[in-house]
Image: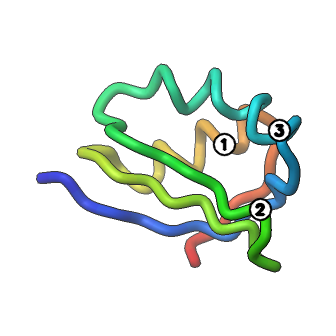
Amino acid sequence: MEKEMKFKTNINCGSCVRAVSSFLDNMAGLKEWSVDTDDADKILTIKGEIEESKVVEIVKEAGFDIEKA
């Protein structure tokens, strides 16, 4: 079942978004993602059929901090 999840991150600029995109774009089950870099909490929104723990693992692997919003 597709769901939407939101996370606080330190993905704070276009370069950071590009750095994490190669990790997120290749995740099985992920339909759509975006980062609101204008928000103080740099909210990452994930949509798809994917486990929360897998999103956290991948974003940390990309070198960024992440926690459930």
- The residue carrying pointer 1 sits among few (fewer than 14), some (14 to 19) or many (20 or more) residues within 10 Å by Cα, namely many
* Scheme by which the image is coloured: rainbow
Q: How many marks?
A: 3
Identify the residue position indicated by label 2 in the image: 37
Identify the residue position indicated by label 1 in the image: 59
State the residue lying farthest toward the left. 1
- The residue carrying pointer 3 sits among few (fewer than 14), some (14 to 19) or many (20 or more) residues within 10 Å by Cα, namely few
Image point 86% across, 56% down: which residue?
12
Percent x, y of residue 37: 77, 62
Q: Nearer the viewer, mark 1 or mark 2?
A: 2
Percent x, y of residue 65: 79, 56
Along the line of sight, which residue is nearer the eye, 61 or 11? 11
For mark 1, give the secondary structure. helix
For mark 2, give the secondary structure. loop
Within the image, what quadrant is residue 31 found in?
A: top left
Are the two marked residues, 3 and 1, in contact with CB atoms closer than 8 angstroms?
no
Image point 60% across, 59% down: which residue?
44
Please indicate whether residue 8 sits to the left or right of residue 53 in the image.
right
Within the image, what quadrant is residue 14 found in?
A: top right
Identify the residue position indicated by label 3 in the image: 63
Above or below for 27 versus 66:
above
Residue type marked 2: Thr
